Structures are given as structure tokens and as C-alpha cells.
Image: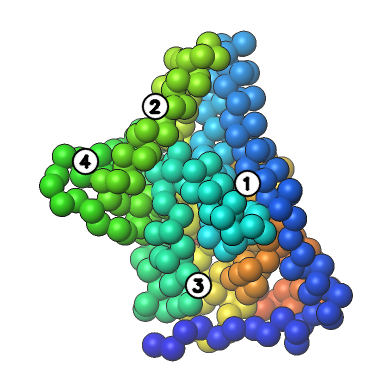
Amino acid sequence: MAPVSRIDPKTLFTPDEWRQLTSRSSWRGCWLVAHAWGTIAASIALVTIWPNPLTWLIAVMIVGTRQLGLAILMHEAAHGGLHSNKAINEWIGQWLCAVPVGSDLASYRSYHLQHHRFTQQPEDPDLSLSAPFPITKESFTRKAIRDLTGQTFVKQRLPLFLSLFRRGASGDTVSHESFLSSGADKMLRFLIANVILFVVFWLCGAGVWFFGVWLFAMATWLPLVTRIRNIAEHACTSTGPDPFSHARTTRANIIERALVAPYWVNYHAEHHLFMYLPCYRLPLAHRLLQEKGLIGRVTVSDGYLNVLRLATSKS
């Protein structure tokens, strides 16, 4: 099948508007990565200073969401959006964003650009994430329980770990369900990065929270919010010819941005329409589409609970 149609932004925006939308800041890209790690550090400090069930739960949810945030910023690097210097963009996207959560920037970029080229078409590598929807509430509940009990984590990560002990295990694929990259070399980098993180936690007097928050969040909250993000982006959207309708934008409140959708990932329709816009320009793109009366062609939902209601509406 032919690639999906593309919108010429010059037919929608004035030159000044397009210049503003496409303007990038290397400092802001670096700041977003620093913000993700700073938020993780602050959450670990919170539970270290005031260890109790409430602060632990808050830390797990925030850290799990910022782990997703690191994957989102790797996605930004895949589009060249973290830094204007290509070498710096690649290094930050790979070593500060991708590797600590088990991904690989180069593998992800190849896979992800295929998704953009054939969005919601048979050749889309992510089509399996949206095609089954809507599902029943019971089916989603079972999936969420598997996420929160670590079953999804074991299912996804154990084969990657075992690849370290299999001769010739050098595959280079990206999971359709997550951003994880296969291959023994990638798993080894992930393990080394996390050993370094454990040493940093331990030197800061928070070694126990490497396991109790960082790894626990990666095994529980991260799979759940990754699933919710996957559902919100393309489930129950159109597979027709209009590129405005291939992805969803979800209007997220401050709690949803903190615990489910960091770094403007909720503006997914705008990202698909204009995929090389930096993530911090997507709210402006949304506002301009509203002003021009074009937002009606976009699938827009008010909050993630409404998205889940729609996605689990099968009786």
C-alpha cells in the first residue's frame, strides 16, 4: 500500500506561524532531559527522607512516568529534536534516554519512521497495538493487572536477558508493545547502565530505592502507562485516507501530565501531522488548528479516562 498522505504545512500556516512552530532550542531539549532525571532524583530524595507508604507510592508513579518520559525524549531525539548538533543529539538520545530504560535509538528510529510512513495501514509496525480495539473492560483489567504485578515486565524483559547466554543472539528489532530493543549487545548496555545507576543511588545513600523505586516502577507503573499511551495514540481512530484522523490528541490535565503523559506526548495527532516539530511546539500547533477551524478533523478526547472508556466499550 502507498504511504499515507502528507499535509503541506504551507497550505495551513502563514510563514511566521510555521517559523514559530519549527523553531528549535538545543538548550530546551537538554533541559527536558535534565528535568526528567531531576524529577527522578527528587522522587528518590522524597522517599529517602520521608520513607512511608504514601511517599513510596508517589515516587513509584512519578519515576515510572519519567522512565516513559525518557523513552519519549528518545523519540524526540529520533526526530532530531533534542539538539541541533547531530552528534550531541544522538549521544543524549542514546545514553541518557534510551539505554537506561532498555531501548536503542538507531533501532527505534528505523522502526518508528516506518510507523509514520504507513500510519494505520497494513504496513504499519504499530498497527497491532490499535487494531484490537475496542475491547471489553474485563480484557483491559486483566492486562492492567499483568502490568501492575510485573508479569508484563517479565514477559518483555526475560527473553532479552536470556539472549545474553544464547550464541548468535544479535537480532535488531523493537517491540510493538513497548520501546524495548532486542539483541544481546543492547541488553548488556542496559544492564551496565543500571549497574552504574545503582552505584549512584548507593553513593547517595539510597541504594535500597534503586530496587524499591527505580526497578519496581520499571516493572509495574511503566508498563501500565506505556499501555495507556499506546491505546490513546491510535486506538479507535480512522484507517481512512485523511491524515488528520489517524492519531488522537488527548487533552490532559496536570495530574495526567504528571502521572501518564509527560512532555506533550498527548498531542499525538499534531505530531503525526507535522512530525518534525519539537515536542514543546505541539500545544501551539493544536491551538493554531483550533483557530483555523481544522481541529474538527482531528480525533480529540477529553482526558485519558474518556479514552479508556471508548477503548473498552466492547460488550
**First in residue order: circle 1 vs circle 3:** 3
**First in residue order: circle 1 vs circle 2:** 2
Distance from disc 2 to disc 3, alpha carbons, whole Å, reads 35 Å
Q: 129 left or right of 27?
A: left
Circle 1 or circle 3, nearest the eye: 3
Distance from disc 2 to disc 4, alpha carbons, whole Å, reads 16 Å
Mark 2 and mark 3 residues within 8 Å of each other at the beta carbon: no
Q: Which mark is residue 195?
A: 2
Mark 2 and mark 4 residues within 8 Å of each other at the beta carbon: no
**First in residue order: circle 1 vs circle 4:** 4
Residue nearer the viewer, 152 or 275: 275
Disc 3: which residue:
116
Residue located at (60% from left, 34% from top): 37
Distance from disc 4 to disc 3, alpha carbons, whole Å, reads 32 Å
Q: Which mark is residue 262?
A: 1
Q: Position of residue 34 (x, y in %)?
A: 65, 38
Q: Which mark is residue 164?
A: 4
Q: Position of residue 49 (x, y in %)?
A: 62, 11
Residue located at (60% from left, 26% from top): 41
The amino acid on which the numbered mark 1 sits, given as a three-letter code, is Pro
Distance from disc 1 to disc 2, alpha carbons, whole Å, reads 26 Å
Above or below 109: residue 218? above
Circle 4 or circle 3, nearest the eye: 4
Image quarter of the C terminus = bottom left
**First in residue order: circle 4 vs circle 3:** 3
